Image (spheres, rainbow, N blue to C red):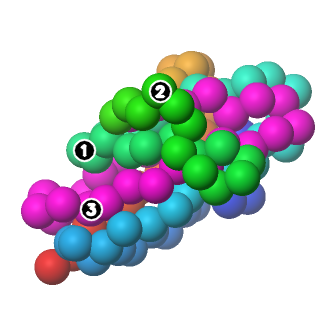
Amino acid sequence: MGINGVPSWEAEPLVAAVGETAVWTIENTMEFDHPFHLHGFFFQVLGADGQPVRPLAWKDTVNVPVDGAARFAVRYDNRPGMWMFHCHILDHADAGMMGMLQVVR
Ligand SMILES: [Cu+2]
């Protein structure tokens, strides 16, 4: 298992800057739903049309359905450091479905 085609132990950290807002798209090409979880920051889930899903809510986990995708917008507020993201099915995370986000000043 992996993210962006590689298991966590082969992955390079993603790099972002404090103050930046990013839109993540997570596509699921496997035969299970995967609850994607990001540490350190809350995000706003976006629908397929790119608009925020209502009712508006801050989330740290979003389900990524089979043969589907999830999108969210996240702002890297003032917490630089190395933050983990992973599938919240911990067997999947242990099998490689995990990565690191490095937020730099
Ligand atoms: Cu999973």
Is residue 56 on the magenta stretch? no
Mark 1 vs mark 3: give the one in front.
3
Q: Which residue is mark 1?
A: 40
Find residue 71 and name its label: none
In the rendered image, the vertical position of residue 31 relative to residue 12, given as above or below:
above
Q: Which residues are magenta?
A: 59-86
Magenta stretch secondary structure, dominant: strand
Q: Which residue is mark 3?
A: 76
Along the line of sight, which residue is nearer the eye, 11 or 4? 4
Mark 3 vs mark 2: give the one in front.
2
The answer to whether marks 2 and 1 mark residues whose Cβ atoms lie closer than 8 Å is no
> Which residue: 38% across, 44% down?
43
Dot 3 or dot 2: first in sequence order is: 2
Lateral position of residue 26 relative to residue 79, left or right: right
Amino acid type, callout 3: Tyr
Ligand 1 contact, mark 3 (Cβ < 8 Å)? no
Is residue 69 on the magenta stretch? yes
Q: Quadrant of the C terminus?
A: bottom left
Amino acid type, callout 1: Gly
Q: Residues within 10 Å of mark 1 (few under 14, many from 20)?
A: some
Give coordinates of residue 26: x percent, y percent. 66, 50
To which quarter of the image does residue 81 belong? bottom left
Tell me the distance, in whole angstroms, between the alpha carbons under discs 2 and 1.
Answer: 22 Å
To which quarter of the image does residue 42 belong? top left
Give coordinates of residue 44: x percent, y percent. 43, 43
Q: Which residue is mark 2?
A: 55
